[in-house]
């Protein structure tokens, strides 16, 4: 059965800290792994990863995929209170367009 | 580009009534639309996948007679929760592919919060 597991479930940090969020997966015929940020409404797209070892970067956020070990990490450096959100990891297989979501990591950044 | 809207953004209804939620792709033709449900502090759970002009494919455990999906055009899909009950109260989110982004990218609507009294 396809599944996505994220850790930790919850994280509380102070502004300026660096955080690493983890996502491990099992999916048939893996095609891509996606990271989303969800605040009060629907998720907003952060990254799509398809190849191992290639870091995707956007400002203070970066992510990398390890297809051999079946996991991805999302790093946020110099965290700000605006980074407080739920971060969702999802994977997609070639057999389908469906996304399988993890339960998310709730990040709270305090001043 | 690639904007998806949902209407209404929130709805409160009495138990036993039906509620229709619309999902529109505003600036692209959505080849496929997805409907998700999210309960508090839980992740998104896919309910069904719909392609324009064909019947929706429901995930295991989702009652297709209760959650009616109509994908009438390439820009509109509707989800009707029939005979809603309090346990159907949830956050319903749609997404669409075909927005010209990276292959497989789903663009999410803002969600509809349903409360059934």
Image (cartoon, rainbow, N blue to C red):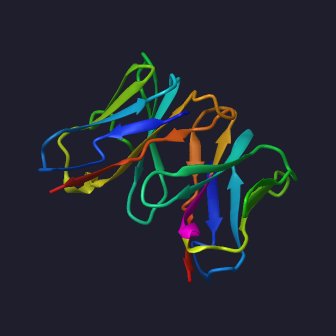
By secondary structure, the bulk of the magenta-drawn segment is best described as strand
Number of numbered labels in the structure image: 0
Q: Nearer the viewer, residue A39 or A34?
A: A39
Is residue A103 part of the magenta span, yes or no? no
Left or right side of A85 for B73? left
Residue at 21% x, 56% y: name it.
B86
- Quarter holding residue A66: bottom right
Q: Nearer the viewer, residue A44 or B95?
A: A44
Q: Which residues are magenta?
A: A82-89
Q: Nearer the viewer, residue A63 or A71?
A: A63
Left or right side of A10 for A32? right
Left or right side of B38 for B12? left
B71 in relation to A67, above or below:
above
Residue at 63% x, 61% y: name it.
A5
Residue at 36% x, 39% y: name it.
B6
Is residue A85 part of the magenta span, yes or no? yes
Residue at 73% x, 42% y: name it.
A30
Query: Where residue A26 sits: x, y (%)?
Result: 70, 52
Query: Where residue A47 sits: x, y (%)?
Result: 69, 49
Q: Nearer the viewer, residue A3 or B92?
A: B92
Left or right side of A25 for B14? left
- Quarter holding residue B57: top left
Query: Where residue A21 sits: x, y (%)?
Result: 68, 68
B24 in relation to A103, above or below:
above
The quadrant of the picture occupied by the C terminus of chain B is: bottom left
Query: Where residue A17 sits: x, y (%)?
Result: 69, 80
The quadrant of the picture occupied by the N terminus of chain B is: top right
B89 in relation to B101, above or below:
below
């Amino acid at each position: 059965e396809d599944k996505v597991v994220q850790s930790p479930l919850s994280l509380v940090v102070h502004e300026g800290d660096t955080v690493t969020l983890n996502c491990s997966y099992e999916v048939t015929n893996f095609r891509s792994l996606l990271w989303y940020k969800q605040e009060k409404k629907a998720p907003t797209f952060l990254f799509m990863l398809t190849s191992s070892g290639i870091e995707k970067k956007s400002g203070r956020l970066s992510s990398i995929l390890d297809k051999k070990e079946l996991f991805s990490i999302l790093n946020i450096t110099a965290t700000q209170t605006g980074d407080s959100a739920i971060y969702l990891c999802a994977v997609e297989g070639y057999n389908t367009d469906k996304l399988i979501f993890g339960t998310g990591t709730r990040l709270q950044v305090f001043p | 580009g690639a904007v998806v809207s949902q209407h209404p953004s929130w709805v409160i209804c009495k138990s036993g009534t039906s509620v229709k939620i619309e999902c529109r792709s505003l600036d692209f033709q959505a080849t496929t639309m997805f409907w998700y449900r999210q309960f508090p502090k839980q992740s998104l759970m896919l309910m069904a996948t719909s392609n324009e002009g064909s019947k929706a494919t429901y995930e295991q455990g989702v009652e297709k007679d209760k959650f009616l999906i109509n994908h009438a055009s390439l820009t509109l899909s509707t989800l009707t929760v029939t005979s809603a009950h309090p346990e159907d109260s949830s956050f319903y989110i749609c997404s669409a592919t075909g927005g010209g982004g990276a292959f497989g990218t789903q663009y999410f609507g803002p969600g509809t919060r349903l409360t059934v009294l």
